[in-house]
Image: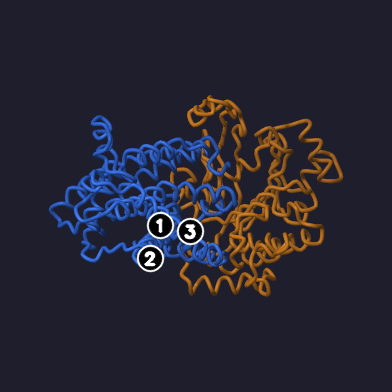
Chain colours: A blue, B orange
Amino acid sequence: MSVAGNLRKLMAFFHRDFAIARGYRGALVLETFEALFGVATYYYLSLFVQSPELTNALPAGSNYFAFALVGFAFFDYLNVSIDAFDTSLNEAMQNRTLEALLVTQTPLPLILAGSAIYPFVTLALRTCVYLAWAALLFGFAPRSANWPGAAAVLLASVLAFSGLGVLSASYQILFKRGNPAKWIVLGVSGLLGGMMYPISVLPRPLQLVAHLIPVTYSLEGMRAALLDSAGWNRIGPSVLALLAFAAILLPLSFSVFAWALNRTRVTGTLTHI
Amino acid sequence: MNDSRVITVESIEKSFPPALSGWRALLQPVAKATETALSGVSFSVGAGEAVALMGPNGAGKSTLLRILATLIIPTRGRATLGGFDVEGKSAEARKQFGYHTGGDEGFYSRLTARANLTFFASMNNITRERAAERIARISEWMGLGHDLDRQVRTLSTGMTHRLGLARAMLHEPGILLLDEPTRSLDPIAASEFRRLLKDEIVRREGTTLLFASHTPREVEEIADRVVLLDEGRVVANETPQRLCASAGTRTLDEAIGRLVRHPVHAESVQ
């Protein structure tokens, strides 16, 4: 199958999911306002926790609201990366479309990738909505942000996180429910990745662990690019670290996924719920 | 190999691991396969033939169809569709067949019938233009034309069955694999569906049909030949008429009852 053919298929997945989402227009509107509630919560929390010590620990020129907003908005990329693959798999098993898809001329990895496009596109829009609410109502002003740098960090992050997502999907097709990999990754990343507080406040041993998880580099790079107008010399190490994670996680996760897929075809449980 | 054989099943065996529960469920993916579903099943189907797989529940009909549909890997043996090994050349094998199970699920219920067919057409490498042509043609001879732009959730069970068959036929496969195609249809819809299969798909299109069924009347109407399975083995491989003669009965129903209760190997029946 040619690259153009695969791209056509990926677009077909996007059209499918967009058409389904259009059937639930009310939910789209509600999500926009849900983002407002999230942003407002962080804004008022930031008013409460302001202190000179905290300000010293944050990137120069930023405040806790901007720090938490970027953490909160971009941690979602880890969430969606891990969730998108196994959610699409789960939905296909639940509505019995998985079997119909598996007998087509589209391999399962492409089915998973295609099903993840719509969640990523809506996530990008949601991020814009978060930032727009914050800028419109709460004084968030990333005027001198390094946008190309932020885009590079985002792309490298999605690649690294997708490796974790494919591992999570491997667990899902083998065991169907109760995915501990997802909760471990999200729990550890939420605790140690610097979403709500800088990792400098953690005990030294936990700071070392924090540097072993990709989301730490993602949030560091993103905050440097958006809040500190950092150049490539500061963003580069975060991007390289994320690409290194991707170089390890993607081949590993695809190997694990191929093994898991083969096992379920042997055990006959591929389409079981 | 005889060129007219488009489906070959050679000594297929399939065993599954037992379902494990509790913490042992974590070992399910590597559990030893001890439960036998198929034991050395062999037969072939010629081009344009309509062959029914019959047998009691648990005989192995669905397992065999799922092996042919590349959804399950056999434990031993070999099967080919259009000359392509379903295990070693599964991508090529998938181009040869359409597969439909008798349920009315497996569609995106919020999308229209047309949007569903267009999506599955693109999954089978069919361009949008070609898909539009195929959908128009298939929906015309399947009587789906007026319902193409309705959401699938509003279609009747019978129409959804037809939609499933239309999806299986989109990429013009030479082989159609159907698992209990008239399950859950009322008698009139089932009769119409059987007419569609025999007259339009097998006779007019020349499609080779292998279908699992529990309904003797359906088999008598559609099938040129019956492969009767019992406990994972072929106990008969005959035309419906010769099957009755072999079993010394007047009806297919009685013949199956007799053969399944007193299994004999296909060779001795032949």
Given the image, on which type of amino acid does mark 3 rest? Glu
Q: Residue at x 85, y 46 (%)?
A: B251
Pick whichever of labels 1 and 3 is earlier in the sequence.
3
* Marks 1 and 2, the one that precedes in the sequence: 1
Q: What is the distance, in whole Å, between disc 3 and disc 2 at their CAs?
A: 15 Å
Residue on which disc 1 sits: A39
Give residue A71's position: percent from left, percent from top.
33, 50
Label 2 sits on residue? A137
Q: Horizontally, is A174 left or right of A55 in the view? A: right
Mark-to-mark CA distance, 1 and 2: 10 Å
Where is residue A132, by image quadrant?
bottom left
- Nearest the eye: B223 or A183: A183
Query: Which of these two is toward me, B224 or B147?
Result: B147
From the viewer's perspective, is the residue at label 1 or at label 2 nearer?
2
Residues at marks 3 and 2, common chain? yes
Is the C-beta separation of discs 1 and 2 under 8 Å?
A: yes
Figure check: B126 above or below A160 = below
For the residues beneath circles 1 and 3, the answer to whether they share a chain is yes
Identify which residue is drawn at 53% across, 73% down. Answer: B132
